[in-house]
Amino acid sequence: MSLFEGLKKFVSRPAEGTQLDALCKTHPKFLAKGGLCAGLVVTETAREKGLPLDPKDLRTVEGGQVAGLGKAAVQKILEAHEIKKVLAEEGGRTSRGSLGLMEAYVKALNELDEEGDLDLKAALDWWIQKVHAYFASEGPKFQFDPGKSLRANIEDLLNQAESLQAEGGGTNYAGAMLQHLVGAKLELVLGEGNVAHHGFSVADHSTSRKADYQIDTVAVHVTTHPSEALVRKCADNLKTGLKPLIITLADAVKPAQFLLTGANIADRVDVLDIAQFLTANVYERSFFKTSECKVTLAALLDRYNAIVAKCETDPSLLVRITR
């Protein structure tokens, strides 16, 4: 089914919005954050300026992004429909594929306008419904599986974050989840209010931070992809009397150690696997009673969700916990 055919069926028979749902199965990016933002803004632009639209007019001067597509424009539309949650911090502006979606959607709208078979309000209402559905089903889900090891349960959650990242048009779900899971563990160990939390996208230099977390003289760096820049930061930590600790994914431990060896500081920096780091903590806080591990892990995720709700604007980072 073409984009034109699916949209025509929807707007000519509004009660059967499932026709546009079928269309989105062939264009799945429309239901990601970037696609939803593009659909909202292009539809609103068509309502304001009228049709036909020229796709060239909806490109930025540089030509690499959709003009008018940003957080402010998207949130204005959502708030007019009593939705206050932030759909995307960049409003889909940086999402890969937004230009292609915009061009295909404009073509469909123009063709429908020529036929006189278009209800833009109904189309906008459909996008709003999909935003509601997105918020309702967003984020990774966690259900403790007693048949698996504790580490495997944690890795299932991390794998979901990586899958969301692959589908999320550039959003670093895995990196954000790692940072806030570490923050949650630190807070449970040290007590609420004793750990400073920051949004994942907040650069260290903008807050004068030496690491993602600094606990006494330990500088904790959380990353999915250790880099030479991180190694330089660890070297700077050592010069100022701090003890660097890198927490990363299991597959990234050896690459991190390799980079540290090249900088001659491998024996001065600890590198830990995030799953092992969390697994050990859950066992310790459960007093090694396997019957308590589910409750302890759920408490860790509750603290993670509280931190995300406070520091992030993207609700899809929240973990839905089945108890």
Image (cartoon, helix red, strand yellow):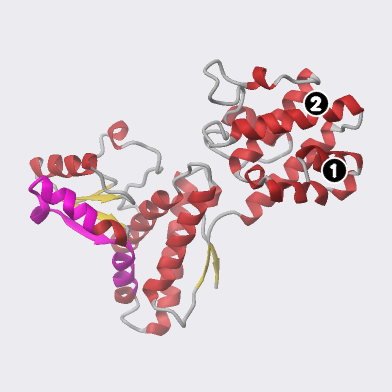
Q: Are marks 1 and 2 in contact (CB under 8 Å)?
A: no
Residue sitting nearer the eye, 16 or 71: 16
Residue sitting nearer the eye, 317 or 259: 259
Q: Of marks 1 and 2, which one's residue comes earlier in the chain?
A: 1
Q: Is residue 149 above or below residue 210?
A: below
Residue sitting nearer the eye, 116 or 190: 116
- Single out the residue that lies furthest toward the front: 1
In which image quadrant can residue 91 be found?
top right
Residue named by callout 1 = 10
Q: Is residue 281 above or below residue 58?
A: below
**Mark 2 falls on what kind of element?**
helix
Tell me the kind of residue under disc 1.
Phe
Q: Which secondary structure class fits the magenta region best?
A: helix
Q: Residues within 10 Å of mark 1 (few under 14, many from 20)?
A: many
Q: Position of residue 1 (x, y in %)?
A: 78, 46
Does the magenta segment cover residue 6?
A: no
For the residues marked 1 and 2, what is the alpha-carbon distance in whole angstroms?
Answer: 15 Å
Mark sitting on residue 110: 2
**Mark 1 falls on what kind of element?**
helix
Q: Is residue 167 above or below residue 150?
A: above
- Single out the residue that lies furthest toward the top: 61
State the residue at coordinates (43%, 71%): 153
Q: Position of residue 231 (x, y in %)?
A: 19, 44
From the viewer's perspective, is 158 left or right of 57?
Answer: left
State the residue at coordinates (72%, 19%): 54
Q: Position of residue 305 (x, y in %)?
A: 48, 56
The residues colored magenta run: 254-282
Q: Position of residue 178 (x, y in %)?
A: 37, 55
Tell me the kind of residue under disc 2.
Asn
State the residue at coordinates (11%, 53%): 266
Q: Residues within 10 Å of mark 2 (few under 14, many from 20)?
A: some
Does the magenta segment cover residue 267?
A: yes
